[in-house]
Structure formats: C-alpha cells, structure tokens
Amino acid sequence: MKIVVLAGGYSPERDVSLSSGAMITNALMEKGHDVCLLDSYLGIADGEEIRFQSLNDGGNHYYEIGKDAPDLEQLTDAFHRRGFMGNRVIEACSLADIVFLALHGGAGENGQIQAVLDAYGISYTGTGYEGSLNAMDKHIAKLMMREAGILTPDWKVYTKGKRIEPYTLPCVVKPCGCGSSVGVVMVENLSQWEDALHVAFQYEERIMAEAKITGREFSVGIMGKEALPVIEIIPNEGFYDYENKYQPGKTEEICPAQITEEKAEEMKQLALLVHETLYLGYYSRVDFLMKEDGSLYCLEANTLPGMTPFSLLPQEALAAGITYADLCNEIAKHGKGVLS
C-alpha cells in the first residue's frame, strides 16, 4: 500500500508524535509498504515532490524526545504560522491508500483532523472524529464512563477567568484535553493550588481538578475486539509524568502485570467496556488505577496511543506475540473508511 504517516502537528505532544511517526514509518517500510512521513503542521513546500519511500530507498527514521514538552509559541515564531494543517497535506494524503495517524494530542487526536479527512473522502487509521472527541476531552469521557457505571475519580471543571474555589485536597490538576501528562500537577496542600492552576492554564482555557487516587497504575491496550496483556507502570520517583514516560530508565514497566488472572481479566473487560462506551475505533489504550482494596478506577482512554521506543502499547502487543512491525501493519490494514 501507499501510506502517508502523519506526525508532528501543532500540539504539546509534537515531539512524542515525531518519535512515533519515525518508528511507524520504518516498520511499514519493513512490511513492504511505500511510505511518506509527513509533518501535518509544516506540510510540503510548493514545488517540492511528494515522495513515498520504500525499504529499497534506504534510510532509517529516528526522532529523540526531549525532557520537556515543546514550546508551541517558539514553534509559531520559527515558522510564522499557527494552523494545524500545513501546506499540501491534503494533497499528499489524497495520493495514499490510507493515512496512518501517528499524531498525539491537539487537532490530531481530538477529532479535528479526522473530520477534515472525512470531508475529503480520505481513509485513515484509528478512531473517527466522534470517538476522538469523546476520549480526548477528559470531562466528556468521564461523564460517559460514569453514565455506563465505570468508576472514575471525582472531578470538577474550571474555566480560565472565572472565580475558582480550591478543590478538595489532595487532587490532580490537569488540562481537559492534553495527553502525555502535559500540564499535570499533583496538589497535596493549598500552597500548591495556585501554581498548579497557572501550569494547567498555560495549555488550555478549561482545566479540571480530579480527586487523587492512591494505588497501582496499569494500562490495557485494545486491538479489534481483543484486550492485550495488562501492563503495570512503576515510576522510579514521582508520578508517570512527561519525563518519566519518555526518558530511558525513569520507569519500570511490567508486562504481563504481576496480578491474579481474575484481576487481569476484570481489567481487560473493563477496558473493552470503556472502548465501546466512548465509540473508539480499531485500537486504543485504557489507563487505570487500582486501590489497595482492588477497586479499579479508569483515568482515561487514548485513541492514538504512543508508538515510541518507550510506549506501552507496543510492549503489550509484544507480550501477546505481536512484533512492532506486525502491530503497525495490522493497524494500517484496519483503517477507517469515509464516515464509518
């Protein structure tokens, strides 16, 4: 197949996406596809050839993730543009059999790019615009989960510029629509509250405070209608923040998780229920906290899980006997058609 891998974008998770996109491109070429790796924010200059590479063309794509999320204002200043869809991106995508969405956060994961691709009749991987919006907006996702009887930590939404009363402490303050733990702050006492608001409001006008649940952290990947082996996430220090997610040696990940078969099966079934409740596509990843009494609380669902060297979904797939290249190939084979 001819495949465009869309990566980068205008999002705090831009660097993570570029890393995912590089690895996905290598894997798809390994499986015999012709691939065009394209930054959805930068696009293609007028007059530049839209080039699909095969394995025979040589080259190995790689992108290293820094310790901190990128500064989008610096990106805007450097390239003098802010929109999420760069020059000739749709033209390139229209030449492909399918677009592999390696985007994370922002317009790439909240349904906006999915809606644009639908409007042009272009097939793509992952979840459609409706499910993408449901999952990316943490407030909407939690409302839908609670309606379905799925436990999720209590929360309250705050809007920038309005009167804000502190939430019950301890809590977790986070933007409503960011991933990769961008803008997330743990608040243990009142002296930390205002600083946490300042951090979260740098990324979005609408944020939430969520009751802090103490327990073990797990994640469950979904492919098709099957749940992958459960993975446990144990940061060496602090919580599973941006640095601990993407810097080597910062977090221990155990897959399959060292829990009973009964508890693993319960978590898998719950992940499938979350996936169905939010109307997600062929694949996703669902994150949980388990309290000491064994109760499971869903934190969020990821419609375009990371595919970097340190990401959870590829580790879970490998534990199920699925190589990275086969994982990418299966996702590409199960792309969405127009408005499906």
Image (tube, rainbow, N blue to C red):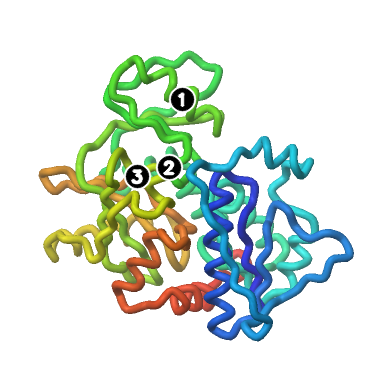
Give the crowd class for mark 3: few <14, some 14-19, many >=20 residues within 10 Å: some
Q: What's the distance in space between the residues labelled 2 and 1, CA to CA?
A: 18 Å
Q: Is disc 1 in contact with disc 3, using a CB cutoff of under 8 Å?
A: no
Read off the residue under disc 2.
181
Nearer the camera: disc 2 or disc 1? 2
> Is residue 181 left or right of 18 when viewed as pictured?
left
Read off the residue under disc 1.
158
Q: Earlier in the sequence, mark 1 or mark 3?
A: 1
For the question of whether residue 340 can be seen, the reply is: no
Q: Amino acid at mark 2?
A: Ser
Q: Residue at x 39, y 70 (%)?
A: 223
Nearer the camera: disc 1 or disc 3? 3
Q: Which quadrant of the structure image shows residue 93?
A: bottom right
How many marks overall?
A: 3
Q: Earlier in the sequence, mark 2 or mark 1?
A: 1
Q: Quadrant of the N terminus?
A: bottom right
Q: Which mark is residue 39?
A: none
Q: Amino acid at mark 3?
A: Tyr
Q: Which mark is residue 240?
A: 3
> Is residue 12 left or right of 240 when viewed as pictured?
right
